Image (tube, rainbow, N blue to C red):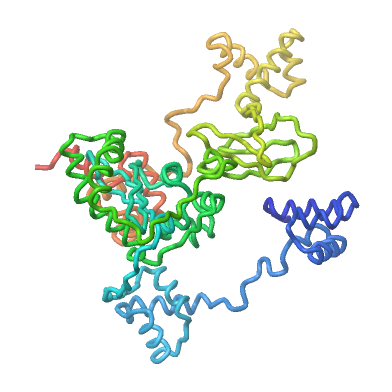
Amino acid sequence: MIIMNSKAQLTVDIIAKVAEGRLTICNATKLLNKSRRTIERYLQRYRKVGVQFIVHGNTGQSPVNKTPDKLKQTVQQLIREKYYDLNLLHLAEMLEANEHIIVKRETLRCWAHDIHHVKRAKRRRSRVHKHRERMEAAGLMLQMDGSPHRWFGNKKSCLIAAIDDSTSELFAEFFPSETTAGCLKVLRSIIEKRGIFRTLYVDRAGIFGGPKRSNFSQMQRACEELGIEIIFASSPQGKGRVERAFDTLQDRLIPELRLNNINDMMAANSYLQHVFIPQFWNKLLTVKSKVNGSEYKPLPAHINLNDICVTKEYRKIRNDHTFSYGNKFYFIESPIKHSIAHQKIEIRNIAKNSFDAYFAGRKLTVSEVIEPIKTSMEDIEIQKKLDVLALADKLGNVSEASRLSGVSRDTIYRHRRLIKQGGIDALRRQETPDLRHKNRPEEDLEKVVVDFSLKNPHLGQAQVARQLKANMDIEISPNGVRQIWLRENMNTTALRLAKLELLPKSA
């Protein structure tokens, strides 16, 4: 049996169509994003071995350079017992010198991490960061970052701020947390107030993309569409202007919000935009750029910020012009002249629970596909019982109905009585509450486990199972201990301590 993912299944389907003459090699290269030589090689192997061409030759085989598990266990045992206080470089040297074991540094680090034995490096001296002059003109560079803090009230909120590197002009707004939607909103407010700037200097957080997100994020995509270059800082000191701005804001803004009895986000944003920034920041902390001109460019007429400063996702269209999004299926109702199957549709999240679908810049009308609910096995069994009863009523002979259906007469009579007493719902399978499962431990064993767990409430399930084996010669798995705890409602240390307090104390 061959198990294939969606990508492999698509490859097999397309190569099969090429082999049957239903698809050209040129179109197959576009659909699979492969070279013509690769498609021809796939086709040659498909004609030779069939569907198995999709399986790589090394599948199921161990790598030739795999380190033996026995060596790994030996090294980990040495780390636990002999070299537990050595750093990785020293550990590699001692293993080679004393044990004649040569292991690569990265492999050794992974083995040490697996057993939680890694000596942390000592705190090094801080690096010297060279002073960088401000940008010459406003709009050449803006620094953006978020600062989670208790800005107002008792709950943490995040202040997302952007500051002009040349003039220290501040753009900021409060949000519940540092999210993509918040950064896009601040970006939009900057463009609406001043215009499109040149570069954005940010840290390596996933919101802004970079290596953590395979160099893609919604902010990166929006900046690329606006012609804004993103620069990633290698350290917090690289974007020190916005970091120092947060120090000032935490030093001055928090007391002002407290003195004005501001405890909600809407009032805090209003005070920040209309009082703090105009009356304090713009008057005392902004500076004049070195040159008189500004690098902010007006927003072109053909650019609509509603199409850019939104979260966009992409889904593949199925053969029947449906796509899935948010665990639901949607059907494209807009009239389309040609099929767009296997193409990508653009999803724009305009609100929390709503979205718009676009294809080639055109807004599409979509509707949710309501799938029929599958009949449960219990309903099928009830229907079978009703069919047998209907057959007996039709024939007027229970014995003949029993012979034809294979159901005993006693069962037919019992089902009739149940319907008279409680209707159709009485035919449902009734669970016996006091039925004890055959795999469940004996009551005496459960009592021993409960008593031992209450005497030692801080022990975990594995420790309880181990000590019962060592002290009382009782064989029970850690999962068995956990199942007993769950039945007795004592699966956490707090619950065991609470149950222990309810027990009568012996004199």
- At 65% from the left and 30% from the top, the residue drawn is 366
Residue 474 can be seen in this image: no
The image quadrant where one finds the N terminus is bottom right
Q: Is residue 157 left or right of residue 376?
A: left
The image quadrant where one finds the C terminus is top left
- x and y percentages locating residue 307 in the rendered image: 56, 40
Q: Is residue 446 left or right of residue 339?
A: left
Determine whether 339 is above or below 378 in the image: below
- x and y percentages locating residue 493 in the rendered image: 27, 47
- At 74% from the left and 36% from the top, the residue drawn is 320
- At 67% from the left and 17% from the top, the residue drawn is 409
Please name whichever residue, 340 or 441, is drawn nearer the observer in this view of the structure: 340
Please name whichever residue, 506 or 297, is drawn nearer the observer in this view of the structure: 297
Q: Residue furthest front?
A: 292
Determine whether 16 is above or below 358 in the image: below
Query: For residue 312, what is the image quadrant?
Result: top right
Q: Residue furthest left?
A: 507
Image label count: 0
Query: For residue 488, what is the image quadrant?
Result: top left
- x and y percentages locating residue 137 in the rendered image: 40, 59
Q: Is residue 196 left or right of residue 463?
A: right
- At 27% from the left and 33% from the top, the residue drawn is 267
Please name whichever residue, 126 or 20, is drawn nearer the observer in this view of the structure: 126
